[in-house]
Image (cartoon, rainbow, N blue to C red):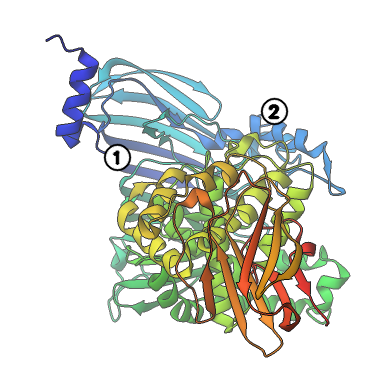
Amino acid sequence: MKISVFSLLFMMALVNPLFAQYWQQKVKYKMDVKMDVQTNVLEGKQQIEYTNNSPDTLKVLFYHLQWNAFQPNSMMDVRSRELGKKVVMGANDWDFRVTDRISKLKEDETGYQHIKTLKLNGKEQKIVEQETILKVVLDKPIAPKAKVLLEADFEARVPMQIRRSGRENAEGMKFSMAQWYPKLAEYDEKGWNTAPYIGREFYGVWGDFDVHITIDKNYIIAGTGYLQNANEIGYGYEGTGEKVTRPAGTTLTWKFTAPNVHDFAWAADPEFNHLRKTIREGLDIHVFYKISRPSLEKQYNTMSPRAKARYNNSVTQYIAEYENEWKTIIPKMEKGFPFIEKHFGKYPWKQFSFIQGGDGGMEYPMATLLKGAGDGVIFHELLHSWYPMIMSTNEVLYAWIDEGFASFAEERVDAYMKGDSSFPHADSYASYVRLARSEYEEPLMTQADHFNTKYGYTTSAYSKGCVFWEQLGYLIGKENQDKMFLELYKKYKFKHLDPQGIIRTAEEVSGMQLDWYRQFFVNTTRTINYGIDSLWQENNKIKIRLRNLGDIPMPIDLMLTFKDGSNHLAYIPQYLSFGSKPAENSIRRTVHEPWKWTHPTYVLEVEGNLVNLKKAEIDPSGRLADVDKQNNKLELNW
């Protein structure tokens, strides 16, 4: 019998799971860098132990050099200015933090990153720099399962703070060191991630970091990683009662390690206040902030009269409330963390730092850079520790997974903190519906940098992404939704997660088929629109005709309220699910025949007398993203 190579490999995969198992690359970074606080130039030496766990032989490597974006006429600069030519909802569509600022940078205000030399196993390699991407043409391919040593000398200049990283931000913070080092690109089953740095976020290789930073000894550093020489450094890092003995000289070398992360960020300023507390066994919360009165006065002076009125038109009150936000982070974490870990999984590292810096709020492993510390932003950025820091997603391709989750979870946590039992996601749903009714919606699967408008990207990633997660709970039931998040944590902790992984996990938890939901809601811009068409009495049955006016099929919860105050929930499963969600509360419920997506109408019948019916309402929970709810409720005044 003659067997083809393909058939042989297929049969081997069936009997040997190693042929089909999940894989991901592995890195170990060692970096020794020196920051000159006068010239804002950083000199560094980098070693990367790189393990090729893929089944492929690698002939090239790619690095990200993201500070090269902060040069006039860069892709980030031109893209921002081009978006700014568009007017969306009455405003220029560019990122208000970037606008045309890069084009106006003076020479010494620009940023850059350059690898001077790069060696593989001691031999220098050919490198080709193309703005924010560096290509390494290997003289010897890296075989599957091989481990190699990459060594690089690099230099970088910190740009004026514009987007995420930089120096001298609006609140007077000196250095926001995000995306600051030559970062090896991720290679996965889709190949190399070579998306240039234009405006959106990132994707990284899992690994361990050992980072030494030498800087003027007056500067305090905060960021990713555990400080290994705390008793030489001090500044609040030292152990209780420990004596700090700093070495002689004008600089200090800070020694950090960070296990199981895919990035490393830090910030530095000589005037940082450092707050610290252990909020549970094995977890310290750190807070770093400064109060620069001139910078905060400048911010206050640019505020609208309405905004100033919230502070009784007093800049002093504004600054006091601003500082209080930072001082109250730790008690908020003490209350919020148990709720978060109960629902989404245990935070696996030993610390998390809230750091003043950057241009808004941006997440990194074990830390976030924040411009202000309001309740929404501190929890939003913390919740990114689950997606994409614990369960890593390719944010270039699937920005809606982590941004949508962080929005969804932030709103749930906010409701918990306030003791509010109302539907927490109403604003996200309303924002999505406005987008869906506009001309600017594009499929969620659009690559993040390729959205035609910033408005379309932002609302899709944050609001429609939030709706995706909450509406998934509508499909499988609240209890299954909670189980799904914990199962995702269990299955994908320190692994890469994609949309299919989410759907498969939801299917496993619920026993339903759900890929149709991904196909409709993620891959298209189709919308949901159900309505109550008519109702009548037939013998002893109340009959209600429902109509699908949209182009996404969904299951239906129809709540019937009677004059005696009783409720009856009629649940119509979606045929494509081949299953039903469990009852979510104690309200009397009947499960009806599934609604086939090919049928535009559905006639529901329940026992009862029509004259006793007071109200019929589709989706009283508010979780169905119906773009026109005017026909979802029928109130009867007999």
Q: Which label sits on residue 27? A: 1
How many neighbours does mark 2 have within 10 angstroms: few (below 14), some (14-19), or many (20 or more)?
some
Residue that badge 2 annotates: 73
Q: Which mark is residue 523?
A: none
Query: Which quadrant of the rendered structure holds the N terminus?
Result: top left
Q: Secondary structure at mark 2?
A: loop
Residue 408 lies in quadrant: bottom right
Residue shown at 61%/49% (left/top)?
A: 553
Image height of 524 relative to 54, above or below: below
Q: How many marks?
A: 2
Q: Tell me the CA gap for discs 1 and 2.
A: 33 Å
Q: Is residue 305 left or right of residue 477?
A: right
Does 470 appear above or below 194?
A: below
Out of 485 and 315, give the one closest to the viewer.
485
Which residue lies at the image location 45% right of the left edge and 41% below the top edge?
203
Amino acid beneath label 1 = Val
Tag 1's secondary structure? strand
Q: Earlier in the sequence, mark 1 or mark 2?
A: 1
**Extreme residue toward the bottom, this view:** 564
Report which quarter residue 327 is drawn in. Answer: bottom right
Residue type (three-letter) at the residue carrying disc 2:
Asn
